[in-house]
Structures are given as C-alpha cells and as structure tokens.
Amino acid sequence: MAAAALYLDECVHPRIAVLLRKDGFDILTAQEAGTLGLDDDGQLEFATRERRILISFDAHDFAPLTQRWALEAREHAGVFLCVQQPSSLVCQWIKGALTAYEGQGLANLVLWLPVK
C-alpha cells in the first residue's frame, strides 16, 4: 500500500503520528505545522493546500463543515473522522481505511472510522 499523506489536527494525540510513522506513513501534525489555534475551516484549508487527508476526532464540527464544502464545490484531499480511542486502535482504523480505499482515491470523501 502506498502511504497517503496525512494531517492530524490538534485534537489528535501526537502519539498516533509516532505509531504511523513507524509503519512508513507520511504524517504531519498541527503541532509540527504550526497550525495550532486555526479554526476548523483553516485546518481543512491547510490540509487541502498540503494535499493531505485530514484526520480529526472533532466530528461534531467537521461533519457539517465538509457538507458545506461539498455544497460550495470546494475540494479537499479527504477527511477521516473518528471518536477518541486508544492510539493503537485509531492507527488500526486509519490503516484499515487506507487499505479499503486503496486505488480508489480519497479526494472529497469523508470517512467515519472504523470503516466497516
């Protein structure tokens, strides 16, 4: 599986980045990018500019935001939303989603993890 470029917003614990990097994933965190404090729209705009799938535990805000973007015909690299769980479990969900959608492209998709 080719590693997709991922962006973890400030709600996602940096330990997830550490674990995924061990498996060869291209990860950027909000802390590393200097984007702490950006509003949700700014987080998605940043991920889009960087061509990275945004991963967030903040589904309450990102679900309606991605709907608005779709209505406005704004494109993004993809969004993974999930509830906060142990880091190892979240990493399994992320890898599972990337495997399930391998070769299909994730642009403009919003996935709720885990993908079943």
Image (tube, rainbow, N blue to C red):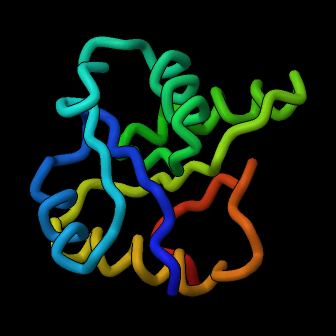
Q: Residue at x 41, y 79 (%)?
A: 95
The reply, left or right, for residue 3 in relation to residue 10 is: right
Place of residue 69 in the rendered image (x, y in percent of width and height, measured from the top left): 76, 27
Q: Residue at x 16, y 75 (%)?
A: 22
Q: Quadrant of residue 99?
A: bottom right
Q: Could you tell me residue 77's position as x and y percent?
A: 64, 47
Q: Is residue 55 left or right of residue 34?
A: right
Up-down relation of residue 38 to residue 33 (above or below): above
Q: Nearer the viewer, residue 20 or 39?
A: 20
Residue 108: percent from left, percent from top: 75, 48
66 in relation to 114, above or below? above
Q: Residue at x 24, y 45 (%)?
A: 12
**Vertical placement of residue 5 versus 12, above or below:** below
* Depicted 37 relative to depicted 76: above or below: above
Q: Is residue 35 left or right of residue 71?
A: left
Quarter of the picture holding the C terminus: bottom right
